[in-house]
Structures are given as C-alpha cells and as structure tokens.
Amino acid sequence: MNIEKYKIDEHNGQLAGKHQQKLNYLTSEFSGVEAVIQKLVDFQIAIPSWALGTGGTRFGRFSGGGEPRSLEEKMEDIGLMHSLNRSSGAISLHIPWDIPKDVQKIRTLAAQHGLKFDAVNSNTFQDQKDQEHSFKFGSLQHVNKAVRKQAVDHNIEVIRHGQELGSESLTVWLADGSSFPGQLNMRKAFQYTLESLQEIYAALPDTWKMFVEYKPFEPSFYSTTIADWGQSLMLANKLGPKAYTLVDLGHHLPNTNIEQIVALLLMEGKLGGFHFNDSKYADDDLTAGSIKPYQLFLIFNELVEGMDARGMNHATGLGWMIDASHNIKDPLEDLLQSVEAIMIAYTQALLVDRKALAEAQQNNDVVRAQEILQNVFRTDVRPLVAEARLRAGGSLNPLETYRQLKVRENLIKERGAKTVATGL
Ligand SMILES: [Mn+2]
C-alpha cells in the first residue's frame, strides 16, 4: 500500500485552522520556536524490524491481521509510518530474522521509502535451526570455546550484512547469565564475554560503533552477565573508542534514576544510543511515554543538556531507536504513538529555560528549579511537533490519518488476516 501525498494534504487542510491557532499561542509563549521546529524536523527515530508484528508474552501471542510477511513488507510498513510522521526514517534490522536475500533490491526499496539502515542487531539468545552448538548456557560467556566462537562469528556475520546495507553500528544484547546460584563463575563469565567482544570489536569497521546493551534480569533469573550500566561501561571502556553503552529504558529495576545514568554516560562520552519503551514492572516493552511520560521528559532534559555541553548534533550524535513489543495493539498505531511521545519529550526538553535553571541550581532554589521543568512538562507542545511534521511533508495528526485512510484494513486485504511476522 502507498499513501498518496494529496490525501495527507487533504487531511491537513481540514485541521489547518485549529492547528495554526495553537501554534500561534506557543510561538508567543516561548522564544526560539523556529530553531526548535528545525531540530524536530531533523530528528529521526529508528524502528526495529521486529516491532511490526504483534508482540507476545511467554504465555501466548495474539497476532493481528495484515502483519508483514517479509523484510520487504516490514520496510513497507515503516515507509507508511514515515510518510505520515516524517520522523521514522530508519530501520534497525535483526539478524537472522531479516537477512536480505537481494541486497541491491533492499537498498533500492529503502531509498524509495526514504529509510536509512540504523544499528544491526545480533541474536544469540535463541538457537537457530541448523546451528551446531546450543546457546542454552550462554553465548559470548560460554564455558566452551567452540560455542563462544560460534557466537563471535555470528556477530561478525551481522556486521557484514550491515555493511552491505550501509548500517554503521552493531548492537549486542546478550541473554547470557545464570538462573541458579552456583551455576556460573561470574568472574570467568565476564572475562569470556570481554574476550569475545574484543574479537567482534576487532572486526568492526573504523566508521562503526558497537553498542553494548545491558539488562538486569530475564531470561536469566539469578544473574545477567551484562546486568547494568556499570558492567556495560566497564566493557565499553576496555574495548575502546568505538564501543559505547546503550540504554534501553525497560532494562532497569523499578524506580532506577535513568536520567542520572544518561547524564553521567554522556559526560564520559560513552553513551551510544537509546532503546525507547515504557514499563510499569520490568521489561514490559510498552509504548514509550504510556506509563511514565515525566521520566521520559527528564531523560530528554539530561540528553539535551549533556549533548549541548559536548557540542553534539542531537539528530546524529546518538542512536535513537524504539525497542518495544506491545502485545495487544495494532503495531503501527503503537509505533506512531511511541514516536509522538518521544518527539513531545524532546520538544519539552528543548524548551527548558537552561539559563534560568542553571541560576536556580546555583542559588539552591529548589522550588524554582522544579517550576521551570514542570512549566514545560505541563505545556501542550504537540502543535510544535505537528508543525515539524507538516513542514517535512507529513500529517498534522498521523494516527487520525492512519485510521481515516484505513491503512490496516488495506494491509489485511493485501496480506491476509492471518499472517505472522518474524520477531518477538
Ligand atoms: Mn533493547
């Protein structure tokens, strides 16, 4: 399915009057709105190839209709999203679920949809059909060198696929750990993991980054070998300048102060990228901003402050990606909501009066500092996000346009009511 531009324009036409009114109000309330809008136009969030199908839990999965059956159809889905919000111009591939059969064709298709290839992701958390050794007891940490080598080789193969497509980063997330006390020598597991990562790092092209992701628990229930940002940072520091820590919002124990982690990693020049999602209990993989929008804003507040302090380009300085697997929504509607929530939090962070905040901090004026942050958080900045979309050729209200144009119904007609996408 293709969304014709005139249909988006038609829809925008209906909303234009009201939109302009709200935009005028914000322009009068805040200074520097034009610069903010330009930053929003430039900001792109990568969509992972596994998020286009309905997610599941370990108890079951309820597939929706019209799910993409191939990499081509996943790209079509992201292309549809991107034509509506103009902020989803990148795809993050998961290998081996999405190995391109015809690289040239996939590159051409990406160009047609206006998509770039973001980080490629390796998978050593499950066994593939014809795999020689099992990853049941870990991959890069495994006690058996042959298993470690198989995992290293897989990661190097993932880099190769990424290179063919023009990707420039590898994300390594490991399920490695142990489920019972005594199962693992933790020191040796960490050491093996480091050595394996060093071999992968040695195969990393000069222009590439390696993102080391961490997670406190699950699937391992007793220990995870890269469990937190300290362990990830330790590895990234030992690996070298191309290695960074990746922060996945869902990979923290409840109430962890993620914004503080982000601030310090940025300060050390070791924050590589983000996986956005939201959660109430653990790694729930919910829509970004659906549970804790204030936390998302506070994270962006540190990101903007920290990136500006280092003179970094917001759009290209870090890897921005969604990593969610909502299990009861239309995946495309969910992703549109996530991108919107991220853009709102980013906009609010851009509008924070930095000078006033620094003054309040210097004077220990706690009340004023809180007021400065909450003033922007409680401002409805959606018209600015909408204006950025409008200028980039997208829809003033992507979700509404999506429903009006009956995108899902059309995809079901094209692909069938019972299709299952590869992924989580
Ligand atoms: Mn993740």
Image (tube, rainbow, N blue to C red):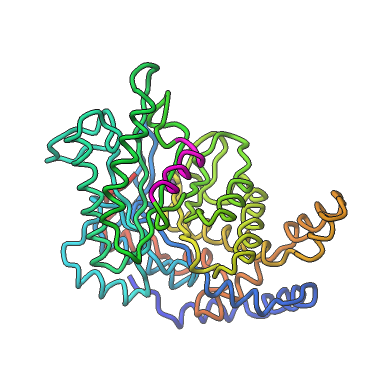
Q: Residue at x 26, y 57 (%)?
A: 159
Residue lying furthest top: 182
Quadrant placement of the N terminus: bottom left
* Front position in the image: 231 or 404: 231
Q: Position of residue 357 (x, y in %)?
A: 79, 60
Instruction: Name the image quarter holding residue 147.
Output: top left
* Front position in the image: 235 or 398: 235
Left or right of 121, for residue 399: right
The mark tally for this picture is: 0
Name above or below for residue 257 compared with residue 5.
above
* Front position in the image: 216 or 74: 216
Q: Is residue 59 visible?
A: no
Magenta stretch holds residue 12: no
Name above or below for residue 191 compared with residue 167.
above
Q: Position of residue 134 (x, y in %)?
A: 19, 32
Instruction: Name the image quarter holding residue 396.
Output: bottom right
Quadrant placement of the C terminus: top left
Q: Position of residue 264 (x, y in %)?
A: 60, 50
Q: Residue at x 42, y 37 (%)?
A: 226
Q: Residue at x 44, y 53 (%)?
A: 244
Magenta stretch holds residue 228: yes
Magenta stretch in the rendered image:
227-239
Dominant secondary structure of the residues highlighted in magenta in the image: helix
Name above or below for residue 337 compared with residue 133.
below
